[in-house]
Amino acid sequence: MKTIAVVGKNFGDEGKGMAVDFLALHSPKPLVVRHNGGAQSGHTVEYKENGKKFLFHELSSASFRGVDTLWSNTFYPDIYKLGEEIEAFRSMFGFVPNVYAMSDTCITIPDDVLLNMALETSRGDSRHGSCGMGINECDLRTVAGYGLSLSSINGIKANDLYKSLLKIRAEYLPKRLKEISSTLTKTADEYLQLLSNDTLLKNAAEAICNNLHYINILSDDSLKEKLKETGTLIFENGQGLLLDRNNKKYAPHLTCSETGLTNPCKFLEHFGYSLNEVIYVSRTYVTKHGAGSLPHQCPRETLGKLEIDQTNEPNEWQGTIRYARQGDINEFVAEVQKDIKQNNADSVKKSLFLTHLNETDNCILMKDMNIPVEQFIKLPEIMNTFDNFYLSDSHYSEDTTKINL
């Protein structure tokens, strides 16, 4: 089995979904693993053969190709939201993708989302840029011993799940509210009121139980058999390297998960495999959708003929997408080299997937100059870091060109 990790090089929105779709087109018997974050990720894929476009959150970005999705135990799915995504996919493409999950995968619950929204709203102008989807709260609750694994709710009746949610609300919620009480302001009141609304939990329990039938929950032994049938295992990261929970340079505007090779390498080691290739994805420029520092930020109109991205419209939680040039060449490769070193991946094939070349006249927009892509990939620092290159100059993965040096 060949194993490939797709990693965003920057702050997200690099084109990871397109890269995963491209790999699915050119790989035997692929299976895609979602392994960090949860429903807050948004990967848009456009399909050349039918002109359709879909925004993926919890499903694999290769779902249109009939590729199955696997949730690892480092992914925090929102089963309530999953139903909406699957039904939207079914209405557009006419079938339901297969979703598999490790049995100890823990789910996001409504109280996680409400706590997230209460905190982020209270921060006012100091918001962290959270999507308001409760991923960090789910992580904190799970670590505190109140996680709800898929195996523990598999086959459960809605009323019994409702009781479990009420127990978490009675035992865990008061402790969490005490921890954050000094942070909360009046702007959080509407969310705090919903944290005492039992009807909300009852409705959520019914929806979650209804949506569980979309998921095939696998034991370790069953997953081992699934992997034996897989020709190419593709890891689809949810956020970019610069948002990794351990990247203190950009704290506190980070995600709560590892966004690089950590999760894929641990997963593969657990099942007796190793990583063959990592593909780092970057636009020819940099975007950031959320609060926090953005080095080399500049007006959008100075970068070229950038298209309007309807999936990155301004929203309440992340504000307006911002734009920047890449740094110097050392900045460009720094986080990649750090990720490789931290995960002992020196022997792994390393590739760079460059997107949006059509918007910048086939140039990489560095802080001091625009470098034609043909020259850029031959720079010593780039050639010493990457073995292969994937170049995309359209919306469609089918148009991607692979270059081997």
Image: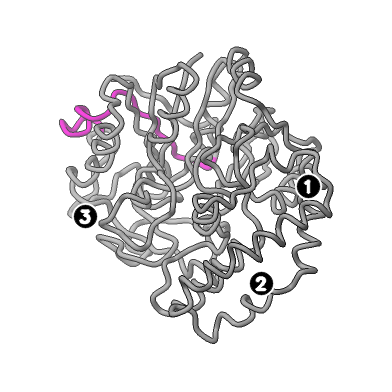
Q: Quadrant of residue 324?
A: bottom left
Q: Residue at position x 75%, y 39% from top?
A: 154
Residue occupied by mark 2: 195
Residue occupied by mark 3: 367
User: Above or below — where is 156 with respect to 116?
Assistant: above
Q: Report x, y in % for residue 387.
A: 29, 23
Could you tell me how far apart the alpha carbons at marks 2 and 3 are, in whole angstroms? 47 Å
Q: Report x, y in % for residue 375.
A: 22, 34
Of the image marks 2 and 3, the number of the one nearer the N terminus: 2
332 or 220, which is in the foreground?
A: 220
- Which mark lies nearer to you, 1 or 3? 1
Of the image marks 1 and 3, the number of the one nearer the N terminus: 1
The quadrant in which the C terminus is found is top left
Q: Quadrant of residue 371?
A: top left
| SS under mark 3 | loop
Query: Badge 2: few (under 14), some or many (20 or more) residues near its Cα, within 10 Å?
Result: some
Dot 1 amino acid type:
Glu
Residue occupied by mark 1: 87
Q: Report x, y in % for residue 317.
A: 52, 69
Q: Residue at position x 46%, y 21% from top?
A: 3
Range drawn in magenta: 377-395
